[in-house]
Image (tube, rainbow, N blue to C red):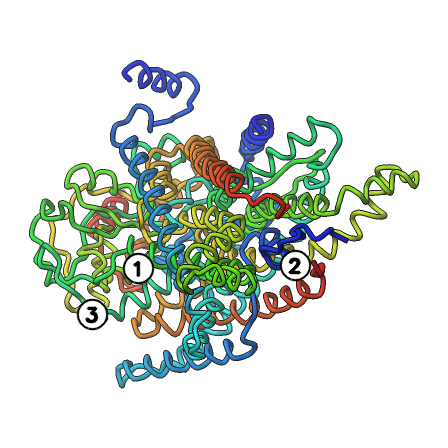
Amino acid sequence: MRPPAGTTDLPVLLSPTAVLRQHDAGMGDPCRLLGPRTALFLVVAFSMAVAGAEAATAPAAPGVIASLWKWAPLIFQGFLFNLLVSVLAMAIGTAAGAILGLMQISLLPPVRRGSWVATQFFRNAPWLVLLFYCMLLLPFEVRLFGLVIPLPAWIKSVIGLSLPVMANVSEIVRGGVQSIPVGQWESAEALAFTRRQTLWMIILPQCVKRMTPPWMNLYAILTMATPLISIVGVQDGMTLTRAALSAENRTELLVPMYLMLLSWFFIYCYPIARWTIRLEQRFAVKG
Amino acid sequence: MEAIADWFKWLNAAHGINLTIFYDDFDRARFLRGLLTTLWLSVVCIALSVVIGVVGAWVQGSRFRLLRRLVQGYIQFFRNTPPLIQLYFFYFAVGGLLPRVTDAHGALVPPVSNYAWAIISFSFFAGAFNVEIFRAGIEAVPRTTVEAAEALGYSRLKAYIHVVLPLAFRVSLPALNNNLVNLVKTTTLAYAIGVSEMLYAASQIWSEVLNVREMMNVLLIVYVLVVGALVWLMGRWERAMRMPGYGV
Amino acid sequence: MLKTILAGAALALALTSVADAQTLDKIKQRGSIVVGVKNDYKPWGFLDPSGKIVGMEIDLAQDVANRLNAKLELIPVVAANRMEFLQQGRIDLIIATLGDTAQRRTVIGMIEPNYYAGGTNVLAPKSAGLKDWKQLKDRKVCAIQGAYYNRRVTQLYGPELVSFTGIPEVLNALQQGNCIAFVFDNTLIDSTLSSGDPKWANYEMPLVTEDEQPWAIAVPLPELNGPYGEFMKKVSIDWHKTGKIVELEKKWGIKPSPFVAEMHQKHKAM
């Protein structure tokens, strides 16, 4: 589809697709992976930390494993809540971002410029600051046409996280559409397709494949940003871990507890990263 | 200066828009210190993460399997876990395990302060991405190019420095810039461990003066300007370094 | 961009002002009262392993709910967000170790009589050898984000404050020597030290307690003198009269506060 951009008589560089993919992904390219070995490494590190902590435990105190076991169900619920927040924020952000992204390729200059500015604004603002903003300045309920819609804290945090997601999706959509060679637009026009038809029937179907890996990458980044909601007072896995640590008040629990939470995130995000790479390789355009 | 301060005092009295950072010396100093800390954190972390990236990419090309594995483990751990929990893990958990040292006041303190942990944690986080970015850049340079350089009389090292690295760097630049911009945004997390960067300073002010809305807006605008300036600079640099006939 | 920001800001402004003025009606209507409490402030408000918030202030909140014949809903707050939550109407009442200061009175309605009182002091390891507030100059001192005494202590004694949003973080940082002292309410320090936990055996509260501040439960400012505010004032008087707070201090193992004892004597006589 794409004309190999680097083709010259003197090929100085290898296929640029790998590099281009990173550019789209926004957060670098999770290259080759080690497979389950990394996971194994994590398990080993975790057991070592637990064993170390166990050794440091005062004889009278309950064991580290027992303490972890006692709190794990509660913290796991909090972790599931993180995942729920990530899914909702992704859904809202994707819907809003797709619209914003299509506006960025509009033929009307004001729409194009306005959506570009909005995209840049929310892309450049730190996630945590946007989260604070929504948390402290959104009202607790909204009245629309006499209907009172309550906005509890966790919904506000979902909105706060979906704003940067929206901006990033907008860029992914714009980048995806613009990665399709102009020739396709021109040939479609020659075949009497309207602009809308070209976009929906020719351009977008090709983009979806290209946009999937960066979109999944964004989802992983979002999931890893969800513990930020603990800073603004929403009870998530992180809050509950801290609460558990404060209730136990035992220093030797610090490393295993945080590692436990870290490994849950790892177990969730790592397969997504692997899957992203597989998709990237499958969709890669041979250059 | 006086006039500006007076005008903002009037703004507060007349319209209830309370921007203490423009007329209260204590708050202004705090906010500016926060801004400087944010910039300083960003610069130090960018530099360190690039170093980590270069060294990591070099190690990934090494012959020792174990070494490569270790770097891979590092990359995967940092890429797939939340940076906030990493920060807590370092500051509270790992920091607690280190031996204490005596400070200037004769008190036993941990050898690594919260500022240092923030720098370490963010640099390693961004560094994990940088390793992959540089690695991909180096791989984009074909063996034949290196061989051609060697045929022209370059030694291996010289070819690496004069041919491979400049090409690899240019290839990596877009992804690198993106990652570094993200790093600057990530420095806000240092708030959680009491590093007095800009978000921290602003939140101190709004929780004391109770001007959340005003400070929130100031904060958002300043961040967007700072990050926007960085993006713009990086973009210019990227264009200046662009290789003709290559790339989007 | 400017348009988007302005529109957004205007929207935010317009929306924040819809907070209902008739909290009592709202409570009746939904059959529950939403109270902002601490969940990291043992024994005033903290989590038990099942995830439930318990503590002395939760008992007080339950008492308010019982009097209103309403269900109790708890929302955990921290010092840095509790007043916004009340203003926005996300919570109906604050019972969260809230210090009653003149500045705060301009934004939320402080219920009198105050139900508790505390001053400012520091928790420090004995090895730090603190004797005087002035020794804090240029040293790292831990604090809680949004506590009213942070500014005063910084301006008077010049410590380098390292503040966190939650108390667990602070206690952790203190135990690890990340700061030499923790500037905090003397009441909590007292209860921490007297808890008999060996963790705190080598810690002390070495300075002279300063800046005594009463604590207040708080309602939205417009309702301070309305039926809701008046109702809460009666509740607070009743707590002192019946010795409810003295009793709860005992239940949660809090060192009896002279302020509470005095208020109890005073109101009992009335």
Which residue lies at the image location 66% right of the left edge and 52% below the top edge? A9
Gap between marks 3 and 2 measured at Cα: 44 Å
Above/below status of A6 relative to A69: above
Residue C101 picture location, percent across and down: 29, 36
Q: Determine the chain carrying the residue at label 2.
A: A
The residue carrying mark 3 is: B99
Residue C32 vs residue A174, the one in the foreground: A174
Residue B209 vs residue B149, the one in the foreground: B149
Which residue lies at the image location 65% right of the left edge and 34% below the top edge? A115
Above/below status of C106 relative to C150: above
Q: Determine the chain carrying the residue at label 1.
A: C
Q: Determine the chain carrying the residue at label 3.
A: B
The mark closer to the camera, 3 or 1, is: 3
- Residue type highlighted by circle 3: Pro
Residue B75 vs residue C52, the one in the foreground: B75
Residue B182 picture location, percent across and down: 48, 49
**Local crowd at mark 2 within 10 Å, few (<14), some, or many (≥20)?**
many
* Disc marking residue A213: 2
* Disc marking residue C247: 1
The mark closer to the camera, 1 or 2, is: 2
**Local crowd at mark 3 within 10 Å, few (<14), some, or many (≥20)?**
few
Residue A83 vs residue B185, the one in the foreground: B185
The mark closer to the camera, 3 or 2, is: 2
